[in-house]
Image (cartoon, rainbow, N blue to C red):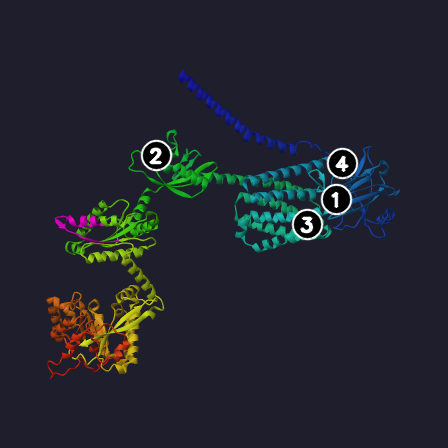
């Protein structure tokens, strides 16, 4: 039974489908065909409802009214000699005319009517030619007597007594009037009038309905071209009304007579403007292909002047003008239309073009017929015919345009559907409750196949908590265009994914896209991590530490305490050099793990150099940070680090500072670095700078000094002092000294020279300082050359930065060249470290300077990693032993031995020796016994004002200690036969 019931339902469904198809075909295809065939049959075969007997056209005699022809009798006298004709054309003349005709005999008793059918006739008055009694009068304002308004003109009711008698009439017209007289049976004229008004109503209703349909279509589709076409149809209807003679009414209401003539001029002009605008809008793209834009532009420029003239000029003057312009314009449009239709095969363009062409041809015919009097086809080719034909073709064009738009819409829909399916980005539609309404395959691949099923339709099922709220806010508040959200971990997947969502509100739905950016997000996170973390140790790098410290400083007013530590591994370079960078990297990683294990999560630990690290202690008092750093030193140094079979002991030094509010990152780093260097010099200790530590003030002073040196007035505070250098062979015979640089700040406080030199090197201004020293020294020597007769040499220091500045060296050479008379007294000091830094450059400089006659001294000899091999590379005149070997040398026998060796070496190389930092009598005596040539230090004199050098007789003159003065006086007396002379020759060298 169940199977039979199923089969029965299936057959009934098939029958129902067949019935639906039959009714659809009958209604859609068969019935319209039947209606069309019946309409054609009725049009050509059935009897007309308005069948009438054709009227008889009466022949008339016409004479122009003049001053001598004002009365009917005068007109009759003139009309007797006028020929008979079927009609009279006024040729645009508005002067009244007199016409006469004979009413034929009536065959039967039916009443007769005589029609004056010209639509241009403005008035008519008739008299009985025999009795000259008035028969009636009519105008566009009203009628009287036997004359009435019929169709587009007037009609005279014929009294039976008038048959076979003459009638004389007076009439005036406007425009291209053709005056004629038709004899009608009264009943036939009434039927003809009914047909006239029915046709006018049908034409008005049909075209207005079509125009309204097009207007509604335009408003719905927001298409300006359809609005333009709708207006053109209405104006086309008015042109048809003008041609047919019913333009005196609109929508069944009579147009005021005073408006009628002016309205005709404006109607013609507006029709011209709308036709031209419609043509250029419809074929805008095609006109750019065929060219001839200039003639179109000229035609457009005539529109507004014509509209003004249609209002200002009388109808009789304006009409020939619009005929001429319209004739040229119509010919131009037809020419362009032919060219366009040859280039395009669009059926829409063909229908539109044909509709316009019919109207243009009919209008051209109207112009020619009115201008030349051609009336042979006026009944069949006029604006009425054109209006009907163009309206029908317009409907076909609209239908074709809609069909093309529908096809394009279907094609776009198909392309969108294909794009929707093939798009690699997930596309979705949600309702306002977050339920999926649609999803493309890409989204199903991302979220799973159950997205559109009841059990898996909700957005929140697939994304992290708060994702729906974020999407809702983005769509409704429009806070952003896109956002990133995390997905929930799906079954069978490892971890959650990350998605980029773009969405917008559309028709009470949320439409958007979903893109899987998991890999991109991970890559971005890795890049962001690497941007602020060290790739080897995975702790913060310098950029990360800078950000962490900057944030901590910004929070300092809230945290109330902040400490920063600088950790440096001692002699870590030896591990890399001896065991390779692989072992060194492993040790670094172990050190970082050990330090990280001891630090809280709130502390930031980063690597800022090869073996240098920084720790930021937010909200940590300096005492607690100091205790933590002490623990770090013990932890790092007390346990070995194993790498393979090797075990390494690593120690560290830490500098710790307490950061003050407002301190900048660079200031904090430079200060903590100084503390670390101080700790490192103590070989593995902790140095702590609290807020008020002198190091902060010193650092601030250095920054101010660097800023001062960068100003144009940097040299204003510089001045010179001079420290005597005494000969230990002839102490009273020479006045030698070293020029020393000094500086006062703007407040008059003396600045330490080592701080000045450090600031000059840090700011890159050492060249400027050395230039000032050399220039000031030469100026002083030039001013006091006569008082310097006992001076054999004057020492002055040059910095390493200046010696590496080629421009500065050229300036030195130029100054030496300019002061050759003083060069022999100059002795330029170069430190041993500078000499070894660039041996070739030092050799060139020494040779060049000695070539001018100046002396060269090696300063601070023995202070660095001395290598005697470089001494053979260039010839120096003086060798200054570093003061660290001289101070308290009598308490250190090794220092005495070193000094003796240096003196012996210098003597063998032909150089004189100066010992600096000699601070007591015993040191001077020991130096004399060793054989040192010159001595400098507080034992002889501190640095002096330059004026004191002028008044002194020798360097020994400055000695204040009586015991030392007595000893110096005895120098040389031990061997009176030996002459006491200074060791330097005053013979100048040859300049190279």
* Frontmost residue, 373 versus 733: 733
* Frontmost residue, 351 versus 761: 761
What is the CA distance from the residue labelled 2 to the residue labelled 3?
77 Å
Q: Nearer the viewer, mark 2 or mark 1?
A: 2
Identify residue for label 4.
189
Q: Position of residue 598 (x, y in %)?
A: 22, 45
The residue lying at 72 percent from left, 35 percent from top is 194
Identify residue for label 3.
368
- Would residue 582 be seen by someone viewing this image from the given angle? yes
Identify residue for label 2.
448
Q: Earlier in the sequence, mark 2 or mark 3?
A: 3
Q: Earlier in the sequence, mark 2 or mark 1?
A: 1
Q: Position of residue 451 (x, y in %)?
A: 37, 33
The residue lying at 16 percent from left, 82 percent from top is 981
What is the CA distance from the residue labelled 4 to the residue labelled 2?
84 Å
Magenta-drawn stretch contains 630: yes
Q: Nearer the viewer, mark 4 or mark 1?
A: 1
Identify residue for label 1.
257
Residue 462 sits above or below residue 723 on the image: above
Q: Which residues are magenta?
A: 629-656
What is the CA distance from the residue labelled 2 to the residue labelled 1?
79 Å
Category of crowding for the residue at label 4, using alpha-carbon neighbours closer than 10 angstroms: few (below 14), some (14–19), many (at least 20): many
What is the CA distance from the residue labelled 4 to the residue labelled 1?
25 Å
Pointer 2 with pointer 1, Cβ within 8 A: no
Pointer 3 with pointer 4, Cβ within 8 A: no
What is the CA distance from the residue labelled 1 to the residue labelled 3?
27 Å
Q: Earlier in the sequence, mark 4 or mark 1?
A: 4
């Amino acid at each position: 039974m169940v199977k039979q019931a199923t089969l029965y339902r299936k057959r009934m469904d098939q029958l129902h489908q067949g019935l639906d198809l039959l009714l659809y075909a009958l209604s859609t295809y068969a019935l319209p065909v039947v209606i069309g065939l019946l309409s054609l049959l009725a049009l050509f075969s059935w009897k007309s409802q308005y069948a009438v007997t054709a009227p008889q056209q009466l022949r008339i005699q016409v004479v122009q009214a003049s001053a001598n022809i004002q009365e009917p009798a005068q007109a009759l006298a003139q009309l007797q000699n006028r020929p008979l004709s079927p009609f009279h054309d006024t040729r645009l003349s508005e002067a009244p005319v007199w016409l006469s005709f004979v009413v034929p005999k009536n065959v039967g008793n039916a009443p007769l009517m005589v029609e004056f059918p010209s639509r241009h006739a403005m008035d008519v008055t008739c008299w009985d030619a025999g009795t000259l009694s008035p028969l009636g009068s009519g105008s566009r304002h009203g009628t009287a007597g036997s004359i009435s308004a019929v169709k587009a003109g007037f009609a005279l009711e014929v009294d039976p007594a008038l048959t076979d008698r003459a009638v004389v009439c007076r009439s005036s017209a406007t425009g291209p009037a053709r005056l004629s007289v038709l004899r009608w049976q009264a009943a036939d004229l009434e039927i003809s009038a009914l047909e006239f008004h029915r046709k006018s109503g049908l034409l008005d209703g049909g075209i207005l309905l079509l125009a309204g349909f097009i207007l509604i279509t335009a408003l719905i589709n927001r298409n300006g071209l359809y609005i333009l076409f709708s207006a053109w149809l209405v104006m086309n209807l008015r042109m048809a009304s003008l041609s047919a003679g019913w333009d005196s009414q609109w929508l069944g209401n009579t147009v005021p007579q005073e408006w009628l003539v002016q309205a005709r001029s404006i109607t013609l002009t507006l029709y011209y403007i709308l036709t031209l605008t419609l043509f250029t809008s419809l074929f805008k793209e095609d006109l750019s292909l065929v060219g001839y834009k200039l003639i179109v532009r000229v035609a457009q420029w005539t529109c507004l002047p014509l509209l003004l003239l249609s209002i200002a000029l009388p109808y009789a003057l304006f009409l020939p003008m619009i005929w001429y312009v319209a004739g040229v314009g119509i010919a131009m449009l037809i020419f362009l239309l032919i060219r366009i239709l040859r280039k395009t095969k669009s059926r829409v363009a063909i229908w539109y073009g044909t509709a316009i062409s019919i109207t243009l041809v009919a209008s051209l015919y109207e112009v020619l017929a009115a201008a030349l009097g051609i009336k042979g086809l006026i009944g069949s080719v006029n604006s009425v015919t054109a209006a009907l034909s163009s309206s029908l073709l317009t409907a076909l064009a609209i239908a074709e345009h809609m069909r093309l738009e529908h096809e394009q819409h279907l094609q776009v829909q198909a392309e969108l559907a294909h794009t929707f399916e093939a798009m690699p980005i997930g596309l979705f539609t949600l309702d306002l409750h977050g339920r999926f309404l649609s999803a493309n395959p890409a989204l199903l691949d991302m979220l799973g196949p159950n997205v559109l099923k009841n059990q898996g339709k909700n957005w929140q099922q697939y994304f992290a908590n708060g994702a729906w709220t974020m999407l809702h806010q983005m769509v409704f508040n429009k806070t952003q265009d896109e956002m990133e959200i995390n997905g929930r971990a799906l079954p069978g997947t490892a971890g959650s994914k990350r998605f980029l969502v773009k969405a917008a509100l559309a028709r009470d739905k949320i439409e958007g896209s979903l893109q899987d950016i998991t890999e991109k997000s991970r890559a971005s996170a890795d890049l962001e991590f690497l941007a602020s973390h060290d790739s080897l140790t995975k702790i913060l790098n310098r950029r990360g530490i800078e950000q962490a410290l900057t944030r901590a400083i910004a929070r300092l007013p809230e945290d109330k305490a902040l400490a920063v530590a600088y950790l440096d591994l001692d002699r870590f370079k030896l591990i890399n050099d001896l065991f390779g960078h692989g072992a060194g990297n492993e040790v670094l990683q172990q050190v970082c793990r050990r330090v990280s294990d001891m630090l809280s999560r709130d502390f930031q630990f980063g690597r800022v150099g090869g073996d240098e690290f920084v720790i930021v202690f937010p909200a940590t008092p300096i005492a607690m940070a100091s205790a933590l750093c002490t623990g770090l030193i013990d932890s790092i140094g007390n346990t070995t680090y194993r790498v393979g079979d090797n075990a390494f002991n690593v120690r560290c030094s830490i500098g710790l500072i307490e950061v003050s509010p407002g301190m900048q990152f660079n200031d904090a780093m430079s200060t903590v670095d100084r503390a670390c260097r101080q700790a490192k010099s103590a070989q593995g200790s902790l140095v702590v700078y609290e807020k008020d530590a002198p190091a902060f003030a010193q650092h601030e002073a250095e920054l101010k000094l660097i800023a001062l040196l960068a100003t144009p007035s940097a040299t204003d505070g510089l001045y010179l002092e001079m420290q005597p250098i005494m000969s230990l062979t002839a102490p009273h015979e020479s006045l030698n000294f070293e020029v020393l640089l000094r500086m006062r700040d703007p407040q008059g406080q003396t600045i330490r020279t080592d701080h000045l030199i450090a600031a000059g090197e840090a700011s890159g201004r050492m060249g400027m300082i050395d230039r000032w020293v050399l220039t000031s020294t030469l100026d002083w020597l030039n001013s006091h050359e006569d008082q310097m007769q006992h001076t054999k040499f004057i020492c002055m220091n040059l910095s390493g930065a200046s010696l590496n500045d080629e421009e500065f060296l050229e300036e030195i050479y130029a100054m030496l060249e300019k002061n050759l008379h003083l060069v022999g007294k100059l002795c330029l000091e170069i430190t041993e470290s500078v000499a070894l830094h660039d041996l070739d450059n030092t050799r060139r400089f020494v040779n060049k300077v000695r070539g001018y006659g100046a002396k060269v001294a090696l300063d601070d000899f023995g202070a660095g990693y001395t290598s005697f091999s470089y001494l053979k590379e260039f010839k120096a005149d003086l060798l200054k032993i570093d003061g660290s070997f001289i101070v308290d040398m009598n308490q250190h026998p090794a220092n005495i031995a070193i000094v003796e060796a240096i003196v012996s070496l210098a003597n063998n190389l032909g150089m004189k020796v100066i010992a600096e930092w000699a601070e007591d009598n015993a040191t001077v005596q020991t130096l004399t016994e060793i054989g040192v040539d010159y001595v400098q230090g507080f034992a002889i004199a501190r640095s002096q004002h330059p004026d004191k050098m002028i008044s002194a007789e020798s360097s020994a003159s400055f000695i204040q200690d009586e015991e030392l003065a007595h000893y110096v006086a005895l120098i040389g007396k031990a061997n009176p036969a030996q002459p006491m002379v200074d060791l330097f020759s005053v013979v100048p060298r040859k300049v190279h």
